[in-house]
Image (spheres, grey):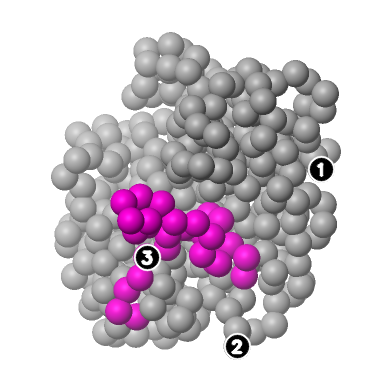
Amino acid sequence: MTDATAVRVDTPGSPATARLLAGAARAVDAPDLVLAVSRNGVRTVHTGGSGEPGPVPRELLGHELGSASKPFAGLLLARLVAQGRVRYADRAADLLAPGFPVHPAVRRITLRHLLTHTSGLPGLPADFYPQAVPRWSTDPYGGYPADRVVRAFLRARPRHRPGTRWHYSNFAVSVLGHTLAAATGTPWEVLLHQQVLAPLGLDATRVRPGPDGTDAVGHRRDGTPVPALDTGGFTAAGGVRATPLDLLTFLEAHLEARPGGPEPRDPTLDAALTDVCRPLLRRGLRHAHTHTLTWFHHSSPYGPVLFHAGATLGQQAFLGFRPDTGLAVAATATRRVHRADTFVATAYGLLAESP
């Protein structure tokens, strides 16, 4: 690591946490790395990496979240439900294309099914791959726009009866985004900003690249830079970009919604933040895996751990928090994930194994 500095932000932070983050950073090889921790609102941020730092501090650069965008989609749905604008049990096809003839199983798919990966839909549409494979390492999603995602959903044949099995699906969460836009008559980007980003003060979070020099640059495993990701019609599933400091703010909002936390600015936002933290379903052998509406949910010696990770062509992100102890961890790295990668395990360890 050629640049490794503990950066104190907003509050003095903790020297012990700074040492912990510095040690953890040595386990991750990436051109740019940010490990950010909040303990009951006290923030400690470590930046480093094997690459040369640019003029904008790493913790102020917008990073691609990939699938770690899904908690934003989940919070948006939960808030719209709290406002009475939609219901979790609403059928997606009825909102997206009223009266359009679809397979009976598609007709049964609800908004909750789409968000919780229980819709029976595959990870991606079948006709996604022919256009994506020739440009898999450069731009697999850009050639598959929103209207194709919607059409693929309306002609789908789910693999399983909705609500009976869990299968991770970028396709399903993308359909959720288009359905909420249709139900509210508001474009997804505008809806997300109105309902989630602006109320939480996430001024450095967006769903498209920012001005030149304000976004982190991703890299392949060999260190070659990759262009900014175009998510095409899959924005709701993986298109959010945010600074690590905004990610801490997002996570802290979930902690503040716990009993005894500060009063929120809006009761529907408080209700949504509480709702997305509630255990909802179990899956796997002996139902060992627990999920909320939008977070993976594990146990730890320090109470429940809620988290989500994501990766794009050249970047990775990890978000997580412990509601019982007020701990939040946001981490970003600018190297594509590979089999021996230690990034997620390192970030998860900071969350689940730290006192």
Q: Which x, y percent locates residue 38?
A: 43, 76
Q: Is residue 143 magenta?
A: no
Q: What stretch is highlighted in magenta?
A: 274-302
Task: Confirm whether residue 181 shows in the render.
Answer: yes
Type of amino acid under label 1: Thr
> Quick one: label 3, few (<14), some, or many (20+) residues within 10 Å?
some
Q: Do the residues labelled 3 and 2 touch (CB within 8 Å)?
A: no
Cα separation, mark 2 vs mark 1, equals: 33 Å
SS label for mark 3? strand
Mark 3 and mark 2 lie on one chain; the one further toward the N terminus is 2
Query: On the image, numbered disc 1 is attached to which residue?
Result: 184
Judging depth in this view, the residue of 150 and 199 nearest the camera is 150
Q: Does the magenta stretch include residue 287?
A: yes
> Quick one: label 2, few (<14), some, or many (20+) residues within 10 Å?
few
How many labels, in total? 3
> Quick one: label 1, few (<14), some, or many (20+) residues within 10 Å?
some
- Residue at coordinates 35% horizontally, 70% vertically from top-left? 299
Q: Which x, y percent locates residue 348?
A: 31, 63
| Residue 14, placed above or below residue 295 | below
Query: On the image, numbered disc 3 is attached to which residue?
Result: 298
Type of amino acid under label 2: Gly
Cα separation, mark 3 vs mark 2, equals: 22 Å
SS label for mark 1? helix
- Residue at coordinates 42% horizontally, 59% vertically from top-left? 290
Judging depth in this view, the residue of 287 and 178 nearest the camera is 287
Q: Which x, y percent locates residue 139?
A: 44, 23
Cα separation, mark 1 vs mark 3, equals: 34 Å
